[in-house]
Amino acid sequence: MLKKTFKKLVGLIIVVLLIGCSSSQQKLPEETPEKVVERFFKLLGEGGPSSLTEARKMVSDKYYHPTEENFKKWVDQYPSSTEIKNLQSKIIKDKRDEKIAQVTLEYSVPSDFGGTYTAKSSMNLILDHKSNSWKIDFTAETLPEETYKKEGGG
């Protein structure tokens, strides 16, 4: 009798643990980080109030969310002729154990000297748990401090 009760208790604990572990594994959003980045830059390229409003909605508010006015100022100089190409993406965990998507981009912009200027950059996206969607880390809050030191030459 004691053995049966013990087996039932162990079985119940295993079921509870399995349910708990599987429910904490949130599914990734249907829209991939690459598609989010493509849509974001397409909206910036279109310009106009409604496109910029939609683009701003794609920005994460986890650490900082720019006001409409600031966002417009920051993206106002974005040339609509910019060509964006996704090179690769990967999903990692940051120092806070949050899922971050790193998308490496190549972009080409018209040069003031003729022709185009091509460069590589990366953009991080933060998994928004409420909406189960990728949001743009517009102010680069998820980039490690070492990144700034490398890019700044210091």
Image (cartoon, rainbow, N blue to C red):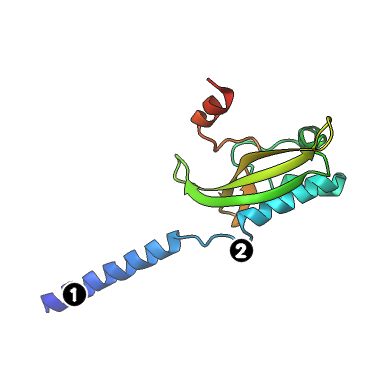
Instruction: Answer few, some or many: residues within 10 Å of disc 1's Cα (few below 14, many 20 plus, some between 14 and 19).
Output: few
At which x and y percent is residue 94?
A: 47, 42
Dot 2: within a 10 Å radius of its alpha carbon, few (fewer than 14), some, or many (20 or more) residues?
few
Residue flagged by tag 1: what amino acid is it? Lys
Left or right for 154, reference 40: left
Residue extending furthest toward the top: 154
Asked whether, in this view, residue 132 is left or right of residue 59, the answer is: left
Q: Would you say the residues marked 1 and 2 are in contact, meaning their CB atoms lie under 8 Å apart? A: no
**Looking at the image, residue 7 lies above or below residue 39:** below
In depth, the one of 114 and 91 nearer the eye is 114
Give the alpha-carbon distance from disc 1 to disc 2, as whole Å.
Answer: 41 Å
**Residue 76, relative to residue 41: is it above or below?**
above
Instruction: From the top left corner, tell me how far across and down residue 33 is, in percent.
Output: 61, 54
Identify the disc placed on residue 7.
1
Q: Secondary structure at mark 1?
A: helix
Residue on which disc 2 sits: 30
Residue 60 percent location from the top left of the image: 64, 44
Residue at the spot 84% in from the left edge and 30% down from the top edge: 112
* Residue 21: quarter of image: bottom left
Against 23, residue 101 (above or below) is above
How far from the left and from the top, in percent, is residue 85?
A: 69, 50
In the image, 118 versus 56, the foreground residue is 118
Can I make out residue 65 in this image?
yes
**Residue at disc 2, secondary structure:** loop
Q: Quadrant of the N terminus?
A: bottom left
Image quadrant assignment for residue 35: bottom right
The amino acid sitting under disc 2 is Glu
Q: Residue furthest right?
A: 48
User: Mark 1 or mark 2: which comes first in sequence?
Assistant: 1
| Left or right: where 81 falls relative to 84 | right
| Residue 52 seen by the camera | no
Judging depth in this view, the residue of 6 and 39 nearest the camera is 39
